[in-house]
Amino acid sequence: MKMTMRPNKREAPVEVDGLSLTLRSVTPQLLNAQVARAPEALDLGGLVAEKPQPYRIGPQDVLLVTVWDHPEISLPMGPNRSDSSYGNLVDEAGFIYFPYVGKLKVSGLTTGEAREALTAQLAKSLRNPQVDVKVLVYRSQKVYVGGEVRNPAIYPVTDVPFTLAEAVNRAGGFLPTADDSRMVLTRGTRSWKLNFHKAVAAGSRLGPILLQDGDTLQVPSASETPVYMMGELTRPGNVPLVHGNLSLAKAISEAGGIQVASSDATSIYVIRAGGSANAVDVFHLDARNPASMVLADRFALNPRDIVYVDAGTLVRFNRVMNLLLPTISAATSVGLTAAQIDYFANRR
């Protein structure tokens, strides 16, 4: 691959093999224009709450109900019991059964509302009943946290606000391979792409980002959207973004640097998919002056960018000759004329 284009003043697209290429030089003006561009708005609609809502009881939750001074209707061990088998299970219809009350619907109530409902019913049989209600086991509401976290699992929603940061904390934090800048939160038919650090920062200003029952939080791997390093580099390959950030200079450094003996320092390119299927943006950096690497350090790469370092003229000549020599040697061995050799060489 040889990039022979050079940026023009108007940066007008040119057609190359059916692709619309726009070539731009990496200059201070280009970098300033990128910085001045309005940042992409973080869509947190429906996720941010002014304040956490109290936990509401649901089916399969286990409640601990204590009526003080009435051990005849409190279960064995009174308030000291902790095993869920001694609690009051909320059935699928949202009811619990309690002595002197019978079936009482508690689904959708907070523990305070459930306490008031039980107190009102027990007051019909007892004088000034003192009732305490708390959730012993949380089972009705769940959130799944998966992907590149240390402990992917289904986690119950409890009375502790289930914020985005709390979800990551419960899952043991991110793995080194995680790309926390492209987390996907799915709720029903809607999904949000979240940069963890930006989302948490926005949540601290606007309100907590709360997860709800049935939400799925998926953390992708950084290997899914790398930057591709090609050409005259010490270690061509893929370089992952860190927290969604990677500069051109850092990417070249991660690839072991440019091969001085074989590279063309005037021809460093960043190739990026444009806004349409056949549009390609190509950014050109002339690194003959080492100070130009300051510009490279300020040039932010995007996922799936291609960084290509071209070979020098002498290296390309030697590679072409290495391709031609076997053909010339073979032709000589069968006694072809010089004109015939030249013909076959030019066909290559």
Image (spheres, helix red, strand yellow):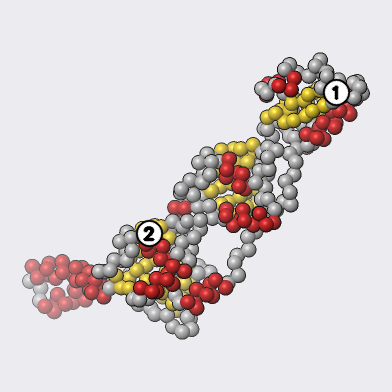
Q: Is residue 76 above or below residue 343?
A: above
The three-letter amino acid code for the residue at tag 2 is Glu
Tell me which residue sits at (14%, 70%) in the image: 328
User: In which quadrant will I find the C terminus?
Assistant: bottom left
Q: Circle 2 — which element?
A: helix
Name the image quarter holding residue 64.
Answer: top right
User: In which quadrant will I find the N terminus?
Assistant: bottom left
* Left or right: 321 as drawn, with respect to 105: left
Residue 216 makes an appearance in the image: no
Tell me which residue sits at (51%, 46%) in the image: 174
Q: Circle 1 — which element?
A: loop
Q: Residues within 10 Å of mark 1 (few under 14, many from 20)?
A: some
* Left or right: 210 as drawn, with respect to 116: left
Q: Which residue is mark 2?
A: 254
Q: Is residue 224 above or below residue 20?
A: above
Question: In x, y percent, where is residue 276?
Answer: 52, 69
Name the image quarter holding residue 26.
Answer: bottom left
* Left or right: 13 as drawn, with respect to 46: left
